[in-house]
Amino acid sequence: MDTKQAIIEAAAELLARSPSGDVSTRGVCDAAGVQQPVLYRLFGDKEGLLAATVDHVWDQYLGAKRVAEKSADPLEDLRAGWDSHTAFALAHPNAYKLMFAPTLRSAPEAAREAMRILREVLERLAAQGRLRVPADDAARMVMSANTGVALSLITRPALYPDAGPSTLVRDAIHHAILVEGGADTSARDARAAAASTLLASLDGLTPAPFTPAESGLLEEWLERIPAAGRSD
Amino acid sequence: MDTKQAIIEAAAELLARSPSGDVSTRGVCDAAGVQQPVLYRLFGDKEGLLAATVDHVWDQYLGAKRVAEKSADPLEDLRAGWDSHTAFALAHPNAYKLMFAPTLRSAPEAAREAMRILREVLERLAAQGRLRVPADDAARMVMSANTGVALSLITRPALYPDAGPSTLVRDAIHHAILVEGGADTSARDARAAAASTLLASLDGLTPAPFTPAESGLLEEWLERIPAAGRSD
DNA sequence: GCTCTCTTCGTATCATCGATACGATATTGG
DNA sequence: CCAATATCGTATCGATGATACGAAGAGAGC
């Protein structure tokens, strides 16, 4: 059991120091003081080792950040999440490349966890009526843009000498997915306002996304929403 | 001369068919009917071959598009450039990964040319006073976000089943770098915000004003609203 | 304590890959 | 026709991912 951790830490160490962003199984085994067959018995193949290594680096980094999460305002958390994601990429470029670049066939667990954390923050915003797109779409937008910015910062430092574009892109995406300023209205008020906004603007849609029958039913349902009771 | 082109085309062919996204110099030489030393004499090393191959694929793709460029409205060109970039990634995923993922040490000429084309369009917009950020910043924002979206589409098809996020991120970035143009966007934004607000809060309604079937249909309709009513 | 079985270990080895040395062959200039 | 130069082709190197296979060790049952 301990040898597994020793191998992972040796791999993380070598990976962090590797100029090419790659490590050899021989090098890892030598550094960890084990032979190749034990590595392959514990991790299956090189991809398994790299995935475990990435997860380890990610967990270590996240451990320091986990305490500071879940502030009062989910928008702050959303911004902090983006900046934390970017900072991780700059702090551990090789691990980050393995995590998000198309090197590995299947995404490591760390990438999935990053997506989970992001989606959780977005759902908190959605519950407050502050998302203007479905949470899944917002998650995809934020994640893909963030990885693109982070990879650019890492792999083209001459073109991206500072993290200015990161903040600009971050705010551009957040502006696109968030409702302006509606933090103070309660969820029920926001819902009622949203329903009436839609009711007022449905007729003007061209091309019409609904049949007349659908439109009629939708209007009837929307009228029921403001009266619907307190969820929170 | 001709053997060089033959090698490049063989490499492009093998690269397009490669499930791993990689090719071996031996395979390329066999397919082109030459020996390894000639490859190394013509291209220096494998990276040189791959860079030349990426440039070849990019030129071929761009050749078909070059005629349709430089429309009257640079904003149309900006949108077309984003969509063309994304379409190239989907059409030639392996070449695209080599072009923008951190595999190659130095960016191939094709990547630089893509940046040049983008910056040229942005400078036309800037000349018309329609850019709200410096053209270099705008170029970095657009390029990094676009590569992030494209890489996500390529490498995580399960998470990104369609190009919807591409358009959303595109418009988010463009909105952030451009001065306001359309007048009807505000109404559409309000409508979209209202729809997603409702969508996010429907589940919490107690007592439930809708049957599960109604709820499902309503959600489906609400998801259609943000995309509806695009006039431009 | 002894043996039997099953797991772990360690050597040696395979196959593939990028890259090159070096003699053989062809081509070109005089 | 010859010599100088460039190209070719075999054979090979060094590194790497992955594994076969016998040796050594650890329990389980008697």
Image (tube, coloured by chain):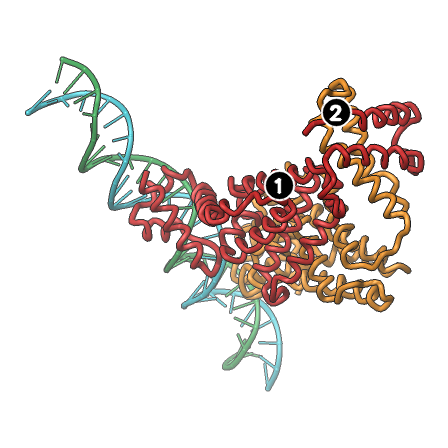
Chain colours: A red, B orange, C cyan, D green
Q: Does label 2 or label 1 sit earlier along the sequence?
A: 1
**Image location of residue B193, percent across then percent down:** 79, 40
Q: Residues within 10 Å of mark 1 (few under 14, many from 20)?
A: many
* Residue B139 on image: x %, y %: 72, 62
Where is residue A85 drawn, in percent x and y? Answer: 57, 51
Give the residue at x 72% y 53%: A172
The residues tagged by marks 2 and 1 sit, at their Cα atoms, a distance apart of 25 Å
**Amino acid type of the residue tagged 2 in the rendering:** Gly
Horizontal side of residue A134 vs D19, given as left or right: right
For residue A121, above or below residue B63: above
Q: Quadrant of residue B99?
A: bottom right
Residue A222: tell me if it is visible. Answer: yes
Please report the residue visible at 91 percent of the width from the left and 27 percent of the height from the top: A211
According to the picture, the residue beneath numbered tag 1 turns out to be A121
Residue B67 x, y percent position in the rendering: 85, 58
Badge 1 marks a residue whose secondary structure is helix
Rendered image: mark on residue B17:
none
Quadrant where the N terminus of chain A sits is top left
- Name which residue lies at 85% across and 37% down: A197
Q: Which residue is mark 2?
A: A229
